[in-house]
Every structure is written in structure tokens, then in C-alpha cells.
Image (spheres, grey):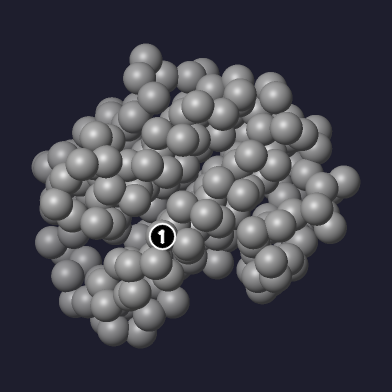
Amino acid sequence: MKVILFGATGMVGQGVLRECLIDPGVTDVLSVGRGPTGQHHAKLREIVHRDFTNFAAIESELSGYDACFFCLGVSSLGMDPERYRHLTYDITMAAATTLARLNPGMVFTYVTGRGTDSTEQGSRRWARVKGKTENDLLKLPFKAAYMFRPNGIQPLHGVRSKTGWINAVYAVSAPLLSYLARTSPGIMTTSEKLGRAMIKVAREGFARPILESEDINRF
């Protein structure tokens, strides 16, 4: 399986990249990002691309892939609503529409989050934006598309957030997070389980297009 990964330098993307590189069934990984991952591996090729609203300049590099793992995402906390919509919806759809045209046999997996509003009518703006993104992704002519909605994610195997204080919180709460990951699948998963589940869904499919934390941990 040949995969394209967006967001490989973020916490979620780091975990997914690790699982792709150690999975013997994943033969090629193309990372598309605004900066390099800093990793070197025989499977890994990287494209540094600045304009995530227009992929025309690199379209020739984006065809011939079986799956896309889209792990870009930002927190809405303290962010201008239009900026959040641009980073969450516009960028995701620009990438996805390009890939759907170039790779009609592709499986597209998108990491959203618990509480996403599929009705697009709720009171929380971020949840409505995520819901619209999910809904419009599911309309694209991919072979299949899956929306991953993890709740909490425990980073493992050296995976780190780009934000220092978040890393500090993870370090202090590691025993609790480990306990919750073992005992409360609806509350906590791990970067390893999330990456493994995304790979498995791309290979085998899933009964529903939306996977909650419980599904991620079970699958």
C-alpha cells in the first residue's frame, strides 16, 4: 500500500507516520507538509509545499497512491472563527478534491475529533465546521472515506506535541493516561492505536464511515 500523509510533524501525524514506516505492508509514504519531518527512512519521501489551498504545482507527484491519512488540524481555542474555518475546512477540501481527481481508487481518512456536529446546526462553531468538513469529504468520489473522531490521545514512542506546555501536561499525567487507555476506550486511545487503526481501515474498510474512540481502540 502506498500512502500520502498530511500533517506528519504534528502529534497525530507523527504517530501515524511511525506506524506506516514499521508496517511491512506499507511500501511507500509521501509526506506533504510546510516543513520537513526530520526523519530519514527508505520508505519515506517528502514534499515541502507552502500553499495548501492550491496543489497544482505538485499534482504530478500526487497520483498512484492507495490511501491518504489527513492529520492536519488546529485547536479553535482563541482563534478567529474565519481563520479556523480556513485552516480546517478550506485546506482539507483543497487537498481532498485534488486527490479524489488524481486517485479515484484512494481511501481517504480524516482525523477530526469527539463531538463533531454532523448536523452542522449545533451551538459550537468548531463542531459545525468539523461536521461540514466531514460531510463534504464523504461526498467526494473516493473509493471510500472514513472520519476518525478520537477523544483523548496518549502520545507514545517519542511522539510529541509542538506546544511545550502540552508536552509537560502529558509527561505529568502519563500514568493516568495509560490507565485510561487500558480501561476507558471511549475516553482515551494512543498514537499507536490510532495509527494502526487508520492503516487497517485503509486496507480492510469499516462498517461505518465514522469511527469514534471505541471503534478506534477495538479495531
> Nearest the camera: 120 or 73?
120
**Residue 116 picture location, percent across and down:** 26, 44
| In-image side of 174 versus 10 (left or right) | left
| In-image side of 16 versus 163 (left or right) | right
Residue positioned 32% across, 42% down in the render:
131
> Nearest the camera: 79 or 143?
79
> Nearest the camera: 71 or 141?
141
Residue positioned 70% across, 24% down in the render:
104
Residue positioned 55% across, 67% down in the render:
9
| In-image side of 61 versus 80 (left or right) | right
Residue positioned 47% across, 62% down in the render:
86
The secondary element bearing badge 1 is classed as helix
- Which of the 4 quarters of the picture holds residue 74? bottom left
**Residue 141 picture location, percent across and down:** 61, 24
Q: Vertically, is 216 above or below 46? A: above
> Nearest the camera: 93 or 178?
93
Q: Vertically, is 79 above or below 117? A: below
Screen quadrant of the N terminus? top right
| Disc 1 target residue | 85
Q: Which amino acid does label 1 sit on?
A: Arg
The reply to whether residue 170 is in sight is: yes
**Residue 197 picture location, percent across and down:** 42, 35
**Residue 123 picture location, percent across and down:** 14, 52
The reply to whether residue 171 is in sight is: no
Screen quadrant of the C terminus? top left
